[in-house]
Image: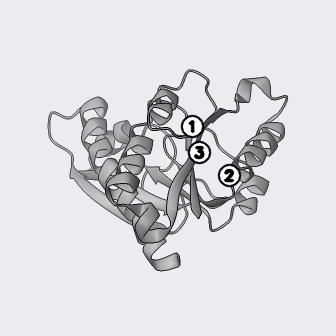
Amino acid sequence: MKNIVILISGGGSNMAAIVRAARDGRWRERYGAQVAAVISNRPDAAGLALARAEGIPTVVVDHREQPSREAFDARLAQEIERHQPWLVAMAGFMRILGDGFVARFAGRMVNVHPSLLPAFPGLDTHRRAIEAGCRFAGATVHRVTADLDHGPILAQAVVPILPADTPETLAERVLSQEHLIYPRAIAGLLATEG
């Protein structure tokens, strides 16, 4: 079985989109794949309840309870490995992971980022795009590498920046595209790398 482990920190809307796509797209039958676990670094992440409602095992590795960034990475890696991941999907996971962690899961980690990478890596992407006078923004699904938000691009979606846009209104439209391209990108990996 190709186990997918999803990492979240908040509401879990991208995680929910992946779970729906896995169910509706019959990933288990078509690709021998399943969402095996959802792991959060925040015990109050709303996405954990969504995952539990879908019958998906959940785990919390609270970064605040770990003595160091390296200790957190080691504990998180241990929990991920328990589920024998074929793929680790970061879906609104708001922790920067160390080089050793990334190397451990090299080639098996993907992320969705709310910009048209390589433009605007990191945080505050929508505000930065508006302030730069960009006419378009978007979302990118990419492989995770040691360089933050610079891994090989798997999928992108373009969203126009409207004259009246605020970072919040732009974020809503970009997020709706993330919900479409992230599951498609994972299904594409399952179909081509299975």
Mark 2 surroundings within 10 Å by alpha-carbon count, few (fewer than 14), some (14 through 19), many (20 or more): some
Residue 67 position (above or below residue 134): above
Q: Mark 2 or mark 1: name the one nearer the start of the chain.
A: 2
Q: State the residue position of label 1.
A: 94
Mark toward the viewer: 3 or 1: 3
Quarter of the rendering containing residue 96: top right
Q: Closest to the observer: 120 or 29?
A: 29
Q: Closest to the observer: 168 or 44?
A: 44
Q: Identify the residue at image location x=51%, y=69%.
A: 152
Secondary-structure class at tag 1: loop
Across and down, in percent, residue 4 comes to 56, 55
Q: Residue furthest left?
A: 163
Residue 10 position (above or below residue 95): above
Q: Amino acid at mark 2?
A: His
Residue 37's label in the rendered image is 3
Q: Residue furthest top?
A: 44
16 displayed left or right of 58: left
Q: State the residue position of label 2.
A: 83
Q: Amino acid at mark 3?
A: Ala
Across and down, in percent, residue 15 comes to 45, 43
Secondary-structure class at tag 2: loop
